[in-house]
Image (cartoon, grey):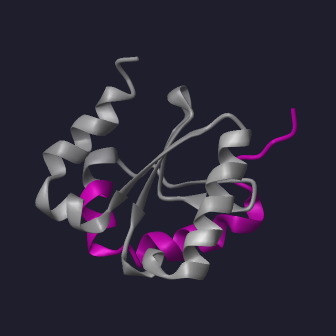
Amino acid sequence: MKNIHNHKYLEERRKKLRKKLTPAEAILWKYLQRKQHSIENYIVDFYCASKKLIVELDGAIHLDFAQQNYDDERTQNLEELGFTIIRFENKLVFESIEGVLEEISNHFKE
């Protein structure tokens, strides 16, 4: 199987994204202990290898029609590789971090 994780050519881009976290990402980042990762050409917000679980946070940009199409295609491609993707709106991180963490932890009980 070819390596699809953490391509070297995306390392600088990952570093730049970590330095420019959205406020919601910064909060969740504290709880999930820096789990940013790249898979193929995608940089995912948070990743757990043992469960092949990807957690994505969606801000206002994800309401854009073109961005939604990209997100749908990206999700489909990642699911075809065997990953599970769960998405949360940024506002949920601010309003209900406990609920977000509970939903994430439910994927570890299965």
Q: Quadrant of the N terminus?
A: top right
Q: Quadrant of the C terminus?
A: top left
Q: Residue at x 14, y 44 (%)?
A: 98
Q: Give the residues in magenta.
A: 1-29
In the rendered view, tell whether residue 2 sits above or below residue 26.
above
Give residue 13's quadrant in the image.
bottom right
Q: Position of residue 72 (x, y in %)?
A: 61, 60
Give residue 28's quadrant in the image.
bottom left
Q: Residue furthest top?
A: 110
Q: Residue furthest front?
A: 65
Give residue 104's quadrant in the image.
top left
Q: Residue at x 34, y 18 (%)?
A: 109
- 67 to the left or right of 25: right
In the rendered view, tell whether residue 57 sits above or below residue 64.
above
Q: Nearer the viewer, residue 14 or 61?
A: 61
- 3 to the left or right of 109: right
Q: Position of residue 107 (x, y in %)?
A: 39, 28
Q: Is residue 96 magenta?
A: no
Q: Position of residue 41 (x, y in %)?
A: 74, 62
Q: Dominant secondary structure of the magenta stretch? A: helix
Q: Nearer the viewer, residue 40 or 62?
A: 62
